[in-house]
Image (cartoon, rainbow, N blue to C red):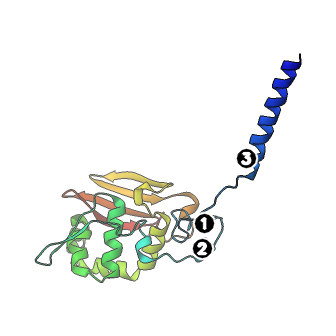
Amino acid sequence: MQRKQHRITIGALAATGVAAMLGACETETRVVRQDGMMLANLPGATGGGADPATVTPRSQDVVGLPGGAPREELDDGTVILRARTGRQLMGHLFTTLRNNERELFVAQVLSTRTKQEFHDRGLDPALAFDELKQRSEWIEKLFQRMPQGEFTPGVLMQRQGDRVYRMTVTGMAADGLRWTFMDMVMEDGSWRLRWFGGQ
């Protein structure tokens, strides 16, 4: 009987010691990145730090990751843009608008179908650049709500037709947006901009 009681006492002491050590442990909280967090700009987002509605992301954060899209410059100065994902297309679109690269935008970001629609109406496709430049705030707000493109939670990627897909911001994330989707088409192994719209 004494042996059994002795084992219980040792077990109780060991459990008390472990509990005391665990009680002394403290959870480490570390903010790796505050501004431009993937979901920080969604309506209703809460948390420490600045009010997400007032946070203005740095330009490279608009498309999620710095250097968001493959851009190659050849020895002769020719720039080649590749967009294997919608997010990369967003990066090229944002960069060409920001840098006023009108010719590069028309040649490698705007889709052939959209250029043809401009031609059919007797308009210069470069007007698409001017139109989007005027609405760059709408584009920036849309991109803030889908910083990882089609990989952003709550963004739908739906087929619209032959090689045309639509990335749509849904739910509360779409609140207050003039444009809620971006249409894109696969041409020559790279995504190109079809256009934007709202629902």
**Residue at position x 58%, y 65% from top?**
31
Tell whether label 3 touches label 1 (CB within 8 Å). no
Q: Circle 3 sits in a helix, a strand or a loop, which is it? A: helix
**Residue at position x 14%, y 78% from top?**
77
Tell whether label 2 touches label 3 (CB within 8 Å). no
Q: Circle 1 sits in a helix, a strand or a loop, which is it? A: loop
- Which residue is label 2 attached to? 53
Relative side of 130 to 9, left or right: left
User: Which comes sooner in the sequence, label 3 or label 2?
Assistant: 3
Position of the N terminus by quadrant: top right
Name the spot of residue 7 as percent of width and height, x first: 81, 24
Tell whether label 1 touches label 2 (CB within 8 Å). yes
Residue 18 occupies quadrant = top right
User: Which comes sooner in the sequence, label 1 or label 3?
Assistant: 3
Observer-nearest residue: 180 or 12?
12
- As drawn, the residue found furthest toward the top would be 1
Q: Residues within 10 Å of mark 3 (few under 14, many from 20)?
A: few
What residue type is disc 1 on? Answer: Pro
- Which residue is label 3 attached to? 22
What residue type is disc 3 on? Answer: Leu
**Residue at position x 70%, y 52% from top?**
25
